[in-house]
Image (spheres, rainbow, N blue to C red):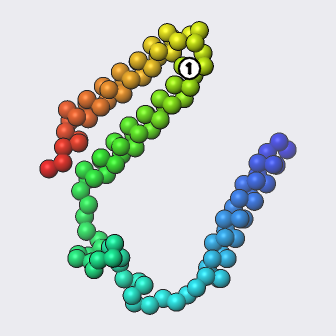
Amino acid sequence: MAYIPVLLLMFLGMAIGIGALLASHFLGPKMANRRKDSPYECGQTSIRAPRHRISVRFFLVGILFLLFDVEIIFFFPWAIVFRKYLSINSFILFEMGVFLAILLVGYFYVLRKGALDWE
């Protein structure tokens, strides 16, 4: 009985999503032509087939960027808490030091493995 509101919200969310997809399918324009179906590369004519291989290093750098970027986001709430609670600053400062040390160990590991070297 307690899950009825949750199930109702899930059903409502799915109904809105499916309704939007069906509405765009039936009400959207259907004017396909050869020029619109051709691949687009920043206004330039394509120089190779659209299905070419991309280096794994590109994805590795992207994942590492996301990883370190998300970790750096944790500094903002820490700064807010650090400023608000002046009575326990030494503990908060120590915890951030541990977090930063773990982050730097990971960064130097990535550097040592050569994951950021683009050759």
Q: Is residue 14 above or below residue 20?
A: above
At a point 36% along the width and 82% down the height, the residue shown is 38
Dividing the picture into quadrants, the one containing residue 55 is bottom left
Residue 52 pos. (x, y %): 25, 68
Q: Number of numbered discs present?
A: 1
Point out the residue furthest to the right here: 1
Q: Is residue 20 above or below residue 95?
A: below
Whether residue 9 sits left or right of residue 34 in the image: it is right
* SS at mark 1 in the image: helix
- Give the amino acid type for the residue marked by disc 1 in the picture: Arg
* Residue that badge 1 annotates: 83
Closest to the observer: 83 or 46? 83
Point out the residue furthest to the left here: 119
Residue 119 pos. (x, y %): 14, 50
Whether residue 33 sits left or right of residue 64 in the image: it is right
Q: Is residue 91 above or below residue 62?
A: above
Whether residue 71 sits left or right of residue 45 in the image: it is right
At a point 20% along the width and 32% down the height, the residue shown is 112
Residue 72 pos. (x, y %): 43, 34
At a point 31% along the width and 30% down the height, the residue shown is 106
Quarter occupied by the N terminus: top right
Residue 117 pos. (x, y %): 18, 43
Closest to the observer: 105 or 77? 77
Graded by Cα atoms within 10 Å as few (under 14), some (14 to 19) or many (20 or more), the crowding at tag 1 reads: few
Q: Is residue 47 above or below residue 11?
A: below
At a point 42% along the width and 22% down the height, the residue shown is 99
